Image (cartoon, helix red, strand yellow):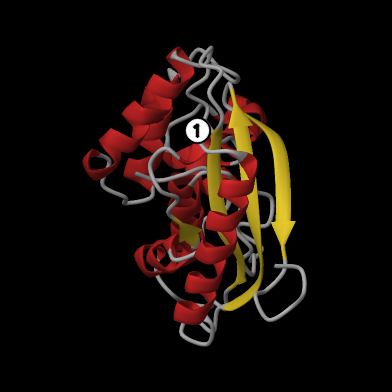
Amino acid sequence: MFNTMNYTVNQSPYTRRYQPRHLLAHYAIAQIDTLKLRSQDIIKAMHYPLKHTIPACDRLRHVLSSKYLGLDGSYSDKYFTADEFLATLFSVLEIPYEPFAEDIAQIKYDLIHSDNPVSKYSLRAQVEFEFNDANWMARGNAARLAHIRLPDGFAELEEAERHVIVKESICEHYQRYEGNLPFEGIIKGYELMTEQNNKVVDSLEYGLPKSSSV
């Protein structure tokens, strides 16, 4: 299952206006770069009418920069529902839709149960990659290495216990991946994000294990 997070990439003229907050968006943006598609090209291929190009481009940017991929109904028009927009976009980008159906279903589930007060934590490395001409699948697989899985029940632990686990997880990740990430990936630091009701309510940055910050 993919998590919402930000990624640091070398953006091209085709992708610099997008700011992905979900790994599916990161995949799509990487494919846009590979295919060298302008937003106008994508909108045209989705068969939007010419007079609706500008608002459709705005919707495209919104969807690819949204942690919910627009499935929260935050941007709509009369041409596509949120689901139809994603499916059509994936088709234009030559990305198979079915393999990601579970992830899309999870987004919808989280939206429905957004009144759940339990905090959700995600830990990731802040990595700079040199993707250059790598295809979208390779980029996505590399970006996933930045995610650090936290143990089940992490949210129920006391703060001191969580801090110990975070420190240990960071050290293990750094020892495993420093100098061993694809695409000349360089670990710049780490970040622990706390979400409640699908909103980031806290973010704590950690330095590298070799520094005094961890």
Nearer-the-camera pick, 2 or 162:
162
102 versus 118 height, above or below: below
Which residue is depicted at the point 40% across and 22% down?
108
On the image, the x and y values in percent for residue 131 come to: 52, 75
Please name the amino acid that badge 1 sits on: Glu
- For this view, does 2 lie left or right of residue 122? left
Res 35 → quadrant:
bottom left
Nearer-the-camera pick, 172 or 7:
172
Tell me if mark 1 has few (under 14), some (14-19) or many (20+) residues whose alpha carbon lies within 10 angstroms of its own. Answer: few
Q: Residue furthest bottom?
A: 179
Q: Residue furthest right?
A: 212
60 versus 167 height, above or below: above
**Res. 181 in view:** no
Number of callouts in the render?
A: 1
On the image, the x and y values in percent for residue 167 come to: 59, 62
- For this view, does 152 lie left or right of residue 157? left
Which residue is depicted at the point 68% across and 57% down?
16
**Res. 41 in view:** yes
Which residue is depicted at the point 47% across and 19% down?
111
Q: Secondary structure at mark 1?
A: helix
On the image, the x and y values in percent for residue 175 come to: 50, 80
Nearer-the-camera pick, 135 or 123:
123
Q: Quadrant of the C terminus?
A: bottom right
On the image, the x and y values in percent for residue 185 come to: 55, 78
100 versus 34 height, above or below: above
- For this view, does 61 lie left or right of residue 105? right
Q: Quadrant of the N terminus?
A: top left
Nearer-the-camera pick, 201 or 170:
170
Which residue is depicted at the point 51% across and 44% down?
22
Q: Circle 1 sits on which residue? A: 156
